[in-house]
Image (tube, grey):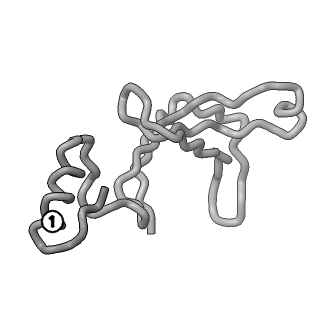
Amino acid sequence: MAILSVKIDVTKLQKERFFTGAKGTYADLTILLRDEPDQYDNDGFISQDVSKEERLAGEKGPIVGNVKWIKRDDQPSAPPTNDPGDSYRAAAAAINQGEAIPF
């Protein structure tokens, strides 16, 4: 399971794009996830959808919010470090346990 935190600025939603459904009033939104977090540590953003015709004409919906990962199934339990000493410590531990030299 993945958990995302979402923040939407509702004042940026274009109300003329809202539609009524069986159980309420809705807005179509799209979440776009980036490969790397942005300068504010957001993992993606949310835009309001436009019609197919508008999309084909090159129009884009307004960006109305941001997304941050809270938890992902493929996320390691401890964040990886960029410490170059980690590989050396692992090699030393393997040697101390009688294993072959790993390099």
- Report the label total: 1
Q: Is residue 39 left or right of residue 101?
A: right
| Res 83 quadrant in image | top left
The quarter in which the C terminus is drawn is bottom left
Q: Is residue 19 left or right of residue 75?
A: right
Taking 63 as reference, is 35 above or below it? below
**In x, y percent, where is residue 1?**
45, 69
SS assignment at label 1: helix
**In x, y percent, where is residue 29?**
63, 45
* Residue at image coords 71%, 59%: 21
| Mark 1 Cα shell of 10 Å, populated few (<14), some (14-19), many (≥20) | few
- Residue hosting label 1: 95
**In x, y percent, where is residue 73?**
42, 66
Q: Nearer the viewer, residue 3 or 82?
A: 82
Q: Nearer the viewer, residue 13 or 21?
A: 13
Q: Nearer the viewer, residue 101 or 30?
A: 101
* Residue at image coords 69%, 43%: 18
Q: Residue most toward the bottom?
A: 98
